[in-house]
């Protein structure tokens, strides 16, 4: 979003206010100047980076301040709107935008053209990208990568240190002297793997086997004797006779 300065004559103030309201709704910073008092703001507008919109209405071509705005404002920041067919000719590259049929609505051809011009001015006001710094950084990274690659190749190509095929005399004397405690020649034999041994699994039975041929050991018990049952008393007989739940044969005394 950029700053916008709208300049017009008195007969185009209503149109300028409509443009100002719509442009502020799109988050632009908009100022409005009209009449002869706008002539004193030309120097400040020349020093700023704001886009200047000149509205050529019916009375604007005959006003001296409008012609001065068109002459002194840089062409890269100047946008001219033609509200009349008698728009004055100038040395501008971009033609004036035809707003004769515009009715204050967005999306119209004139409005879209105005937005395109504003975007072009906004891109021109953007600071230049630091391409030179990026190029220097890329060159430095490439140099570091090249030095690292060269070091890696040099390390990989360096010959490995060779060991002497013959032992020193002192080592030979120590090996051949039996008083040193050093054993004789050693034959290293690789042990067999586990799969080469035929080892039967060891079973640890939890219970002893049962001998079915042995005679069973039975528990000795005493001889059974039936308990002695006494005869029913008189009261038991009377109670049993009066009990309705007992049948006629349930009397224990008979």
Image (cartoon, helix red, strand yellow):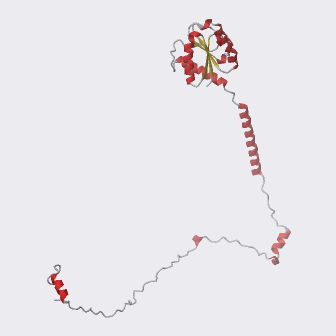
Expressed as whole percent of the image width and height from the top left, the position of residue 165 reads: 80, 64
Answer whether residue 140 is visible to the viewer in this image: yes
What residue is rendered at 42% in x and 84% in y? 210
Q: Nearer the viewer, residue 189 or 24?
A: 24
Where 135 sits versus 151, above or below?
A: above
**169 on left or right of 210:** right
Where 1 sits versus 154, above or below?
A: above
**Quadrant in which residue 169 is drawn:** bottom right
**172 on left or right of 44:** right
Q: Nearer the viewer, residue 77 or 21?
A: 21
Where 85 sits versus 113, above or below?
A: above
Q: Nearer the viewer, residue 107 or 129?
A: 107
Q: Residue furthest front?
A: 235
Q: Residue furthest right?
A: 169
Answer whether residue 98 is visible to the viewer in this image: no
Expressed as whole percent of the image width and height from the top left, the position of residue 63 reads: 63, 7
Q: What is the quadrant of the C terminus in the image?
A: bottom left
What residue is rendered at 65% in x and 20% in y? 50
**Quadrant in which residue 244 is drawn:** bottom left
Where 246 sits versus 234, above or below?
A: above
What residue is rendered at 17% in x and 87% in y? 237
**Quadrant in which residue 230 is drawn:** bottom left
Q: Residue furthest left?
A: 248
Expressed as whole percent of the image width and height from the top left, the position of residue 162 reads: 79, 59
Q: Nearer the viewer, residue 166 or 58?
A: 58
């Amino acid at each position: 979003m950029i700053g916008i300065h709208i300049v017009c004559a008195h007969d185009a103030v209503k149109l300028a206010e409509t443009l100002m309201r719509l442009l502020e709704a799109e988050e632009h910073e908009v100022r409005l100047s009209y009449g002869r008092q706008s002539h004193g703001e030309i120097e400040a507008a020349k020093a700023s980076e704001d886009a200047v919109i000149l509205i050529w209405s019916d009375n604007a071509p005959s006003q001296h301040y409008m012609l001065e705005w068109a002459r002194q404002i840089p062409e890269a920041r100047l946008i001219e709107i033609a509200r009349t067919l008698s728009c004055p000719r100038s040395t501008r590259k971009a033609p004036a935008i035809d707003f004769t049929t515009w009715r204050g609505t967005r999306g119209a051809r004139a409005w879209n053209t105005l937005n395109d011009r504003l975007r072009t001015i906004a891109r021109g006001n953007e600071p230049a990208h630091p391409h030179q710094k990026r190029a220097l950084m890329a060159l430095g990274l490439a140099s570091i990568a090249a030095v690292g690659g060269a070091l890696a190749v040099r390390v990989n190509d360096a010959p490995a240190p060779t060991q002497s095929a013959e032992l020193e005399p002192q080592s030979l004397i120590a090996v051949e002297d039996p008083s040193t405690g050093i054993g004789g020649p050693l034959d290293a034999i690789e042990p067999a793997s586990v799969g080469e041994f035929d080892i039967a699994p060891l079973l640890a039975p939890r219970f002893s086997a049962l001998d079915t041929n042995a005679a069973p050991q039975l528990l000795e018990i005493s001889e059974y004797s039936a308990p002695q049952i006494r005869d029913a008393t008189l009261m038991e007989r009377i109670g049993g006779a009066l009990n309705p739940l007992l049948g006629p044969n349930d009397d224990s005394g008979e």
